[in-house]
Amino acid sequence: MEFVSDYIVPIGCEGIHYIQTGKWRTRRPVLNAETCIKCGVCLMYCPVNSVLRDADGSFRINYDFCKGCGICAHECKQKAITMVAEKEE
């Protein structure tokens, strides 16, 4: 059996789930709990599973793994998620 490398490295979409974002993200999603209708579309579209559902049905963002791609904000029909510059609150 041949190997390309002596190391096992996650590659592709599945691989990105385990890579913490670090300090390179320039934008991040902010969820407005009052506007959110808890439909879960953001959770389904997040390519790295950074949108999490809590026990009460509300959602939150795991910023350790969020890449700042903005797909969750784009797909949210209620506009409950906005993308802000990383330095903003």
Image: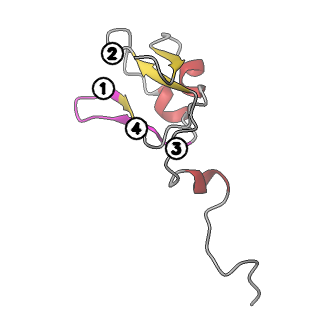
Q: Are there few (<14), some (14-19), or many (20+) residues within 10 Å of tag 4?
A: few
Q: CA distance from mark 4 to mark 2?
A: 15 Å
Q: Which mark is residue 21?
A: 3
Q: Does residue 10 belong to the magenta stretch?
A: no
- The image shows residue 77 at horizontal and vertical percentages of 53, 13
The answer to whether mark 4 and mark 2 are in CB contact below 8 A is no
Residue at 59% x, 55% y is 14
Q: Which mark is residue 62?
A: 4
Q: Which residues are magenta?
A: 48-59
Q: CA distance from mark 4 to mark 1?
A: 13 Å
In this orientation, which residue lies closer to the viewer: 88 or 3? Answer: 88
In this orientation, which residue lies closer to the viewer: 25 or 51? Answer: 25
Which is more N-terminal, label 3 or label 4?
Answer: 3
Q: Is residue 31 left or right of residue 66?
A: left
Which is more N-terminal, label 3 or label 1?
Answer: 3
Nearest to viewer (mark 1 / mark 3): 3
Residue at 50% x, 10% y is 79
Please tell me whether mark 3 sits on a helix, a strand or a loop: loop
Give the residue type that dot 4 points to.
Answer: Asn
Q: Are there few (<14), some (14-19), or many (20+) residues within 10 Å of tag 1?
A: some
Nearest to viewer (mark 4 / mark 2): 4
The answer to whether mark 1 and mark 3 are in CB contact below 8 A is no
The answer to whether mark 1 and mark 2 are in CB contact below 8 A is yes
Q: CA distance from mark 2 to mark 3?
A: 24 Å
Q: CA distance from mark 1 to mark 3?
A: 23 Å
Give the residue type that dot 2 points to.
Answer: Ala
Please give the residue where the numbered disc 1 appears in the rendered image: 58
- The image shows residue 15 at horizontal and vertical percentages of 59, 57
Which is more N-terminal, label 2 or label 1?
Answer: 2
